[in-house]
Image: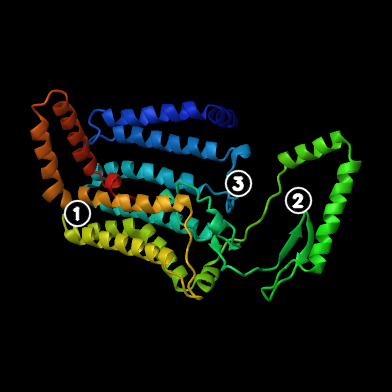
Amino acid sequence: MEAYKTWVRRNKDYVHSLESLANGLTWLLPERFSTSEIGPEAVTAILGILTAVNEHIIDTTPNERHTGSDDHSSFPYALCISALKDLETLVEVVAEQYYGDKKWNFIAVTEAIKVIVRLVLFQKSGYKMLLHGGETPNVEKYSEDTSSQHRIGSFPQPEGHHGPGWLQNSHGQNLGWLQNSHGQDPWNLEGRALSALSRFGENARMISNPVWMQRIQQQHAIMNPPTSIIKRPTLSMILSEKGVNGALFVLGEVLFITRPLIYVLFIRRYGVRSWIPWFLSLAVDFIGIGFLSHVTKSGKSEREQQFHLSASEKDEVKRRKLLWALYLMREPFFSKYTRQKLESTEKLLEPVPLFGTLTAKIVELVIGAQTRYTYMSGS
């Protein structure tokens, strides 16, 4: 296994290209969307899991770890979620073939497992926004105006607030504890004296140390960079620090995580042709995005602080909004409206050489993929 990890890390570009080619070819497998064919979905699931494993190996390269990320647990949550998503389609096909309409019981169990894993990851990560449903680590990269503020976990403190902290030199060594409980300038006489002594000592050591000693120290600093331990925010810390906005943010993320399970449970209760699961799922998505939009735009009062989203979190919000397009592919909207548009487009382009054949194949794949819940669930 170690040899395989080394090979994947050395040839990650080749691995990515090979995986993309293999996953693309799975769409051309014969009887891909047939209810009686388990083989094509099994091949797709195996390739998907293999891709997730390779991504996990590349992401956990020792010398390429994401700096600043809190390694909150050794459990590979992202890999687990990716594997569950790939297995869910296979579970759906097998359950549909052997149990018919009771397949929704198995899909509900799979969705419940994903919800549990994502909720645990949400809590372990300090209640950060889940990127791609938890498949991508949320490594924050904030702009200068927000990163310059003092932060508790992933939440910026108000401007003008300076808490106690360690006075450090350029090598990250602690020189003394600066106590500041009244919001005053922490650089008092004692702090300035310690800083001056530190600079004097460093200058003297630079003069006395030979060049080879300085090179050894530089190499040691590169090989063993200083690590900072960041305390993860707890739910009580978020609620006390952010007030109502903190509660709305957490509630919005919980709604996003649990929405697929709610959708499946109502399909299991009312049937896939009912409008109740469709409208309820859409309402949950709207409410979750509404909470998120509120907490990022409000926060002008002292008790309610505004949330600052990183670039990756802003992209995640856009991705979630794009997922709303899947409602056009879900029953009963698809049967009543979308399918008619697709078939009329196919008939319109059928006489056109090449374009007619290509359109027919695309429509066939779209209609086939629509029959799978897992392809249109957005979970």
Secondary element at image label 1: loop
* Residue 92 to residue 190: above or below: above
Mark 1, other Cα within 10 Å: few <14 / some 14–19 / many ≥20: many
Label count reads: 3
Question: Residue 98 location, x and y as percent?
Answer: 25, 43
> Which marked residue is nearer to the observer: mark 1 or mark 2?
2
Tell me the element at label 2: loop
Residue closest to the far top: 353
Residue drawn at point x = 37 percent, y = 56 percent: 112
Q: Is residue 109 left or right of residue 55?
A: left
Task: Indicate the quadrant where residue 232 lies.
Answer: bottom right
Q: Which residue is mark 3?
A: 67
The disc, 1 or 2, on the residue closer to the chain's N-terminal end is 2
Residue 272, disc:
1
The residue depicted at 22 percent of the width and 43 percent of the height is: 370
Q: Is residue 355 visible?
A: yes
Task: Answer with mark 3 or mark 2, whichever residue precedes in sequence.
Answer: 3
Q: Nearer the viewer, residue 126 or 150?
A: 150
Q: Residues within 10 Å of mark 3 (few under 14, many from 20)?
A: few
| Amino acid type of the residue that numbered disc 2 sits on in the rendered structure | Ser
Report whether 351 appears left or right of 59. Answer: left
**Dots 3, 2 in contact, CB < 8 A:** no
How crowded pointer 2 is (Cα within 10 Å; few <14, some 14-19, many 20+) is rated as: few
- Kindly identify which residue carries mark 2: 170
Q: Position of residue 97 (x, y in %)?
A: 23, 42
How far apart are labels 1 and 2 at the CA level? Answer: 63 Å
Question: Is label 3 or label 1 in front?
Answer: 3
Image height check: is 95 above or below 177?
A: above
Q: Where residue 175 sits in the image (x, y, percent)?
A: 80, 59
Outermost residue on the right side: it is 208
- Residue 35 in view (yes/no): no
In front of the other: 275 or 298: 298
